[in-house]
Image: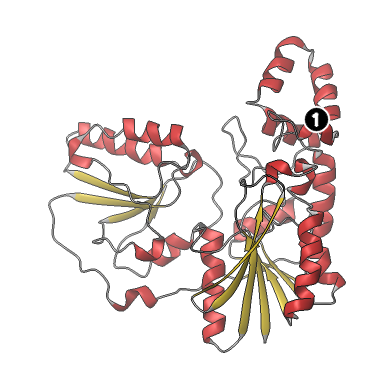
């Protein structure tokens, strides 16, 4: 069978959860004898124009075509983020070129949900994996800009206010305009591409009514909708998605267990974190908790953090400022996950300050003789 995967990215350029999950599926199906190809986003903010060509490569035997885009140069960035006609037009030709038997979309972030109707127009079976809340939330996480969690059941103004809250435009409007005038003005601006593509509004101001309507319709197109999380399924259902969503838990890639690192005796209590160094992951909560335990006179603790503290430099600096207790000074690493083979910690931890969906790392850790904990 010829299978085409469409995703936001793919290793080794991108290593986040969905990209790693897509790579696992592609490699597994190729090993099972299927003909697998991947179409994904490449560079995302480089280049003098929106469309910057494609790059072809083979990764672990899987042909990968990456589309290089600069979203900031799109004619209508707010719309292109969820409905990109240029990626859709490219996909029409690509489908004719590779002629897959089935298309599995694991993320519409970057290439947009505009790819879904193209697949259906071609008469191909379409599978969609829901790996995040992108269809419900322009921030993808259902985590509001004021720090609160969101259930997704919002108005267009709720979403616009959330995305604009920390912008200069919003702060100015909030300071000088009555609430009704502020709302009317910002909603009007969000519907004008000549305004929303300007720096300071770009990527934040969008016609949220149009976004909600288009993506709700796009969710009706796949022949199968899958998710590994019951919580994700329930959240989509609560937001009015009536099409069936099948619960399909992740499997395990156990190839890395051929030579597992041995347990070692130590007087320290070791904690390992693997993931992105961004606020909603709650890495600061882990370090603050360890600091409280250490000052409370408990046994020595060592924390190892595997991730890139430079992804958000200000947050990375905040974490570095928490590294002031010599007995548990964290160690940084930005190597690819498949190359991380540390001595096993006493505990593998996840701290989230948002409604977390599921974790590929969490499931993998359950194959080790360690007690994973989620706070």
Which residue appears at 29% of the width and 67% of the height?
369
Placement of 181 over or under 325, stated as above or below = above
The spot of residue 258 in percent (x, y) is 31, 78
Which quadrant, please, contains the N terminus? Answer: bottom right
Q: Measured along the vertical axis of the image, is residue 269 above or below residue 359?
A: above
Left or right of residue 26: residue 258:
left
Res 267 visible: yes
Q: Is 264 placed above or below 307 here?
A: below
Q: Residue at x 45, y 48 (%)?
A: 276
From this viewpoint, which residue is outermost toward the front?
48
Q: Residue 38, located in which quarter of the rendered image?
A: bottom right
Instruction: Using the image, determine if residue 366 lies above or below residue 147.
Output: below
The picture places residue 151, in percent across and down from the top left corner, at: 67, 43
Question: For the residue labelled by badge 1, is the local secondary structure a helix, a strand or a loop?
Answer: helix
- Near mark 1 (Cα within 10 A), the count class, few <14, some 14-19 or many ≥20, is some
Residue 60 image point, x, y percent: 48, 76
Query: Furthest-bottom residue in view?
Result: 33
Q: Nearer the viewer, residue 374 or 313?
A: 313
Which residue, given by chain and number where applicable, does mark 1 sit on?
Answer: 195
Q: Residue at x 44, y 65 (%)?
A: 363
In the picture, measured across the screen, residue 120 lies left or right of residue 282, that is right
Using the image as rendered, state which of residue 142 and residue 278 is in the foreground.
Answer: 278
- Count of marks, rendered view: 1
Measured from the top left, where is residue 62 in percent x and y? 56, 77
The type of colouring in the image is: secondary structure
| Residue at the extreme top | 176
- Whether residue 250 is visible, yes or no, is no
């Amino acid at each position: 069978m010829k299978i085409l995967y469409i995703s936001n990215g793919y290793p080794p350029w991108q290593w986040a959860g969905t990209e790693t999950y897509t790579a696992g599926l592609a490699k597994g199906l190729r090993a099972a004898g299927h003909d697998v190809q991947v179409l994904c986003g490449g560079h995302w903010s480089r280049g003098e124009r929106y469309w910057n060509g494609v790059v072809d490569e083979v990764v672990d035997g899987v042909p990968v075509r990456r589309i290089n885009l600069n979203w900031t140069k799109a004619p209508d960035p707010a719309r292109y983020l969820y409905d990109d006609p240029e990626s859709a037009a490219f996909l029409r030709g690509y489908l004719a070129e590779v002629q897959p038997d089935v298309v599995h979309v694991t993320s519409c972030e970057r290439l947009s949900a505009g790819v879904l109707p193209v697949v259906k127009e071609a008469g191909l079976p379409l599978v969609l994996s829901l790996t995040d809340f992108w269809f419900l939330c322009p921030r993808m996480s259902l985590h509001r800009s004021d720090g609160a969690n969101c259930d997704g059941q919002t108005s267009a103004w709720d979403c616009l206010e959330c995305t604009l809250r920390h912008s200069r435009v919003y702060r100015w409007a909030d300071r000088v305009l009555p609430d009704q005038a502020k709302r009317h003005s910002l909603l009007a601006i969000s519907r004008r591409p000549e305004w929303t593509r300007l720096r300071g509004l770009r990527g934040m101001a969008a016609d949220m009514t149009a976004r909600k309507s288009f993506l709700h319709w796009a969710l009706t197109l796949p022949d199968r909708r899958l998710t590994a999380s019951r919580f994700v399924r329930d959240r989509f259902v609560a937001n009015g998605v009536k099409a069936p969503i099948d619960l399909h838990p992740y499997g395990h890639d156990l190839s890395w267990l051929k030579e597992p690192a041995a347990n070692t005796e130590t007087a320290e209590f070791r904690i390992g974190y693997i993931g992105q160094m961004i606020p909603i992951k709650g890495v600061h909560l882990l370090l603050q908790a360890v600091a409280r335990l250490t000052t409370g006179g408990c046994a020595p603790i060592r924390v190892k953090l595997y991730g890139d503290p430079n992804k958000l430099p200000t947050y990375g600096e905040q974490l570095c400022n928490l590294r002031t207790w010599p007995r548990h000074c964290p160690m940084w690493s930005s190597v690819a996950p498949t190359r991380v083979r540390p001595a096993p910690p006493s505990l593998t931890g996840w701290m989230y300050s948002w409604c977390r969906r599921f974790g590929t790392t969490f499931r993998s850790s359950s194959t080790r003789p360690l007690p994973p904990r989620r706070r």
